[in-house]
Image (cartoon, coloured by chain):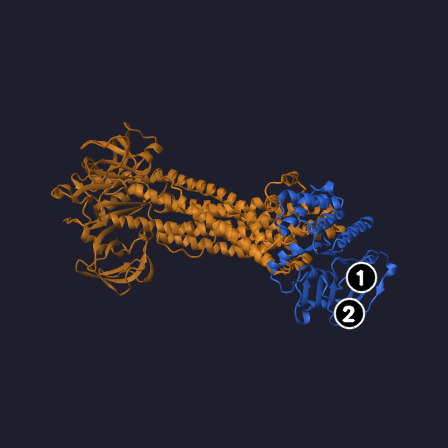
Chain colours: A orange, B blue
Amino acid sequence: MSGFVHQFRRAPGRILASVFALALAVGAVGVLGVPTVAGGTLDAAVERDGLADILVATTPIDADQLASVAALDGVAAAEGQVVVAVETTDGIETSLIGLDLDDQTMDILQLTEGRLPAEPHEIVTSSGFGTVGDRLVVDDTALEIVGHGGTLRWADSAVAYVDLESVLARTGGTNQLVITAVDDGIDELRAIADAARDVLADEGAAFTEFPVYLPDGSTPIDADIEQVSNLIGLLGIVAGLVALVLLASTTTTLITERTREVAVMRALGGRSRPLRRRLRRIAISITAVGLAVGLPLGVLISNLIARMVLEEFVGVTPGLAVDWMVVALSAVGALLGARLVAARAAARVTRLPLAEALRDRDGAPYGRSSGQRLAARIPTGGLFARLATRASLRRPARTVAVVVQISAAVGAAFLVPSLVTSVNGFNAASTAPWTWESLTSSRDPGLPFDVDGLEGHDDVEAGVYSFGEIDDWEVDVYGLESDTRFFQSELRSGRSPSAGSREAMLSAGFADRRGHDVGDAISIELASGPATFVIVGTAEDAGRALYVDRDVLAADLGAPGGANVVWSSDPAPALELPVATDVVTADELAAESRAGRDAIVTIFGAIGVVVAGVAALAVVSSMTVSLYERRHELATLQAIGARRRRLRGLLVRELVPIGLVGIAGGVVLGALGTRGIIGSFEASNAVDIGVVDATGALPFIVLATLAVLIMLAALVTRSVGRRPVAVTLRGAA
Amino acid sequence: MSTTSLLLQEPTSGPATEDTTAHVQARSLTRIWGRGAAAQIGISDIDIDLHRGELVALIGPSGSGKSTLGSLLAGIDQPTSGSLVVGGDRIDGMRPDRLATWRGQHVGIVFQDFHLLPTLTALENVELAIELGLARVGRRDRRARAMSSLEQVGLGDLSRKLPAQMSGGEQQRVGIARAMVREPSLLVADEPTGSLDQANGHEVFELLTGLAHHGTTIVFITHDLALASDADRVVAMIDGRIDSITDRGGR
């Protein structure tokens, strides 16, 4: 540590800049801890809440039917819950979640405030939904909020929890079946669900939705978290790369600038080995101080981002957590990296011929390599152009480091808007085939709409929207009229399904990835059980969906003539429907889509800003050190008559080509990164997303990068111009 | 020149007699670094006139203020107080950019530590001085003049060498070529022979003497009393003040 103090006294500004940049770089590596921090929170929530392994909506079932399911092989416990969509007299749409509060083993309600309901008219609401003591009036019944809390399953919704008995009358039985399995492997869970479906069918009940499986302690948003984690990991790797480059260039600089000092010690009899050890200690002590600041910063960054991710995707606010593995690896990596780079730089410094090292002022004599000598023999451009070119060649490793840093900054700055434009493009492509102005959907499970009852309306069309599984991939299943007016996708191949047939149209991207072609028979697992269709066409819909005849699908789902959605060309159709519904307009959907995109942009923008900021700081730090070392050269130029404008011009000539190469590298890096991220999304979702490069952002990125470099040149020139030339030159001597 | 003909004078005190023919006129020239108790006096209350074509040697022990005075005369440092007029231009308090232009047009500087630009060859280092000081000289002419200047210091063969490929003496001669290539009216050389052997030192001195014959005022800072004795005047400094001025009386 005394080494650090000594160096700090010697050049406090530069050491502080190095430590700060290093600390921020180490801190940025902390984003790699986000998945663990987020995962830890989710695991804790799963453990605490006793999240079920199978969740499925059913027709109302009674205690005997539930007991039959609980008696199945492999079932540890089965519980019934009630979910009822309601609207308060204030116009608030919510759901009443009926739980057996006295005897829960799954989805255990966790209170954050107040107490559990003790009376039929008492409820617990999600945090932020009303205040304790308030009353919600539903169907003329006043429900008093006695507490706030929730379960992981409903964490991202504003719902009201009531005692099961108080809502059973509304449905005539529980309509949500939750099961905990003895063995929660996916195959075991599927087998249990199939068995439960059969048992219920024997007793006159059915699944009304496709079951949600949560194998191996997973949660419903694990896939989202995994994708987000992949993205964060990629950006974390970029941050790590920048950190390494910065560490290497800072360490090398700190050692190389002592060339002359070391030469004097050697001349006075100092042995190389202790000198090298001393130099290594200097680098390691500065890295250690950088770590002392950077590691807590990394923990802070990872927790902030994990909080943003979890609050956005899960509605859970995590506590402070630390990924000790990332912390330990960052520390070991930084110290090891500093040790290795310092060893190399120290060896070079102590091996320079003594006479040359004693003459050298800044640790970088020009003309030692054949490339430098060759460049000196090629008198291209004016003298200032030659000075600029050769200055870059003088320290090639540093020039490469700066180029890499600029590339990383530009890459991050290009990647984030490219992700945004790609997500925008995907959203647009997802909704493009749909031409409705409003979508009315049942808030209760099953197919409660009667298609025949809607026949009289010209501007509406009833349909079925459900889920299924093809090749273990969850897919959206749409039941449409064969001559539907509200879905007009471009076809990649084939045609649309015919009326009343068991023909289907499949999303083109999914079909390609799964190897399904027109003419193939495709098996799909629906809520009601397996069904088979023949593929007659593939649609360019950017989704993972199967489009079939509405009536055929309704029959397959056990509700012939039923529907659960109504598409309309009227934003506010006048419909008389038997159950509570949600109406969403195309504009609202677009706004929702934008809001979702904005949330993602905020999260990745934050990470991108951290990475780009670290890289930019690294560039400024490296360039400042580099230009500071050349103050004698600049003072010499001033002494022989160069005005500050010429000095600025020289630095700009030097920095702009480096900047342009860095920008080019960054754009390639950003474009490849975007493709990598989007590609991983496409692979993990088996859909076509497509990359839309944010070329519109490029002029801003280029201008901003060049502006920073030019500003840097101006600042250095200004600071050089402030000091009398003689004073700077005397410092050189 | 001979040391036997030196004429000792009393040290100057107070303002020098006004000499309207002087090329350089310094009055009460003072340079102090820092303030209060930490103040460090470089030179104090110096009055001196230098004439066109005069070769003046500044001598004195280390820390006596020779280099500080040389820096002020060359316009690479600014006095804390006092006035300094060179060639009719008052340069004390001149703005940095104007001063840089002035240096480029009127001053040549030879540094003790050479201060060559390490990435430029010997020829390019000399050319750069022309480009900065004499903007209207064409590229070809610039190159020819730079080459001629290098040949004058005996380095015509090494024109394409980089400073790192040259000895200290060779680098110093490049520095001299760079200083004299613009034919400045004032040349300040800070221990230019310090890195050279006796023969080369004499050669350099002869070069400077030749320049002085052509009307350049030379300020020659040295520890070499033998060389100093060949100057037109020898200014001895001690503790930031002029201790004595020895006038050979030749000019």
**From where the camera sits, is residue A732 visible?**
no
Residue where numbered disc 1 is placed: B234
Quadrant housing the C terminus of chain A: bottom right
Nearest the eye: A273 or B42: B42
**Residue B153 horizontal/vertical position (percent):** 75, 46
Give the distance between the C-alpha atoms of the residues marked 2 and 1, in whole angstroms: 13 Å
Left or right of A511: which side holds A282? right
Type of amino acid under label 2: Thr
**Numbered disc 1: what chain?**
B
Q: Position of residue A671 (x, y in %)?
A: 44, 41
Please name whichever residue, A35 or A44, is drawn nearer the observer in this view of the structure.
A35
Disc number placed over residue B12 in the picture, else none: 2
Q: Check the residue under mark 2 and report the chain it is in.
A: B
Relative to the observer, which residue lies in front, A288 or A733? A733
Q: Secondary structure at mark 2?
A: loop
Specify whether A129 is left or right of A411.
left
Q: Position of residue A584 (x, y in %)?
A: 23, 49
Q: Is residue A646 left or right of residue A498?
A: right
Give SS at disc 1. Answer: strand
The residue furthest right is: B4
